[in-house]
Amino acid sequence: MKMENDVMRASLASAEAAQNNHTPELKMSARDVRVFYGESEALHGVDLDIYANEVLAFIGPSGCGKSTFLRCLNRMNDTIDGCRVTGRIELDGEDIYDRRLDVVLLRARVGMVFQKPNPFPKSIYENIAYGPRLHGLAESRAELDEIVQRSLTRAGLWDEVKDRLDQPGTGLSGGQQQRLCIARAIAVSPEVILMDEPCSALDPIATAKVEQLITELSESYTIVIVTHNMQQAARISKRTAFFHLGNLVEVDETTKIFTTPSDSRTEDYITGRFG
Ligand SMILES: Nc1ncnc2c1ncn2[C@@H]1O[C@H](COP(=O)(O)OP(=O)(O)OP(=O)(O)O)[C@@H](O)[C@H]1O
């Protein structure tokens, strides 16, 4: 009898474990996040959960607070004079606004890619090697070489640049520069990558390459992307969050947001009635 009970318990435990495997893993969470620029409140209490390995898109009309909220997730707003953030944001259950937290380390764990490609005015090699060197991720030149090659390969850029690693990153095309910036972000092994309209300065072919890359990268990283392009959100994201006038109106599966949103403001936006 005891053995039967043990077997039963073991199989229940393994069924539970299997079920847990399907439960998305919480990566970041935001609660009642407000952002003030001086006296003016730009975000009015945002609650949002972000799951591991998802691509989450932020959409909404200009000025609704998408970039402001994105910047909260790795404390980039700290760099803006007069900007104040309240509420709580956690990464793996840890308060990222804790005063003891090392912000440089946070930004390695939660990397960022900006609207305009912004390579350092250094060689292609140095653009990638800088972060790993800063964080002591390589013990030898050979290890650093390997990180550089691996990052450029993951960003789909290695074949295009392997013969000119010592040339300036700024000499690449816009699309290549953006992939260089993505390679730079992944070189420090981040867990989350924030992207603020990463394709808005790119032509359709370069955009398609970056979108393909985002899809591939989501196997290893959690990706949060601000986009003005609703087709892009529909193509690459699993979930979409709609912002309006500093509020997070709704967040849901992307297909649901674009077919049967819950809120009339979302419907008005996606059907082009404003924005
Ligand atoms: N550095 C700043 N100083 C003062 N106000 C700011 C600053 N950055 C943003 N804001 C204000 O905060 C609000 C939200 O702006 P934010 O850039 O986050 O919106 P957005 O949805 O990303 O817009 P867009 O799609 O045009 O980039 C706007 O009213 C904007 O004017």
Image: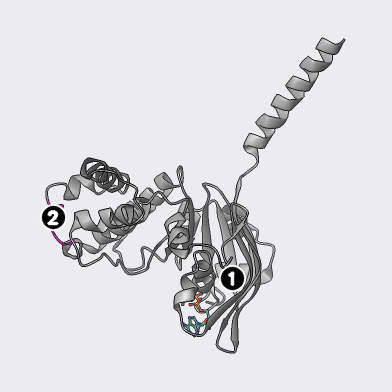
For image coordinates 63% across by 54% down, the residue present is 93
x and y percentages locating residue 53 in the rendered image: 51, 46
Numbered label attached to residue 243: 1
x and y percentages locating residue 204 in the rendered image: 31, 60
Numbered label attached to residue 84: none
Viewer-proximal residue among 70 and 138: 138
Q: Indicate the amino acid at tag 1.
A: Phe
x and y percentages locating residue 258 in the rendered image: 58, 59
Secondary structure under the numbered disc 2 in the rendered image: loop
Instruction: Tell me if residue 129 can be seen.
Output: yes
Secondary structure under the numbered disc 1 in the rendered image: strand
Magenta highlight: main SS: loop
The residue mark sitting in front, 1 or 2, is: 2
Position of residue 201 relative to residue 52, above or below, is below
Q: Does the residue labelled 2 lie within 8 Å of ligand 1?
A: no
For image coordinates 25% across by 66% down, the residue present is 120
For image coordinates 43% across by 52% down, the residue present is 190
Q: Mark 2 points at which residue?
A: 166
Position of residue 46 relative to residue 190, above or below, is below
User: Magenta segment range?
Assistant: 164-168
Residue 33 falls inside the magenta stretch? no
x and y percentages locating residue 139 in the rendered image: 29, 44
In the displayed structure image, the side of residue 161 where residue 86 appears, left or right:
right
Position of residue 206 relative to residue 86, above or below, is above
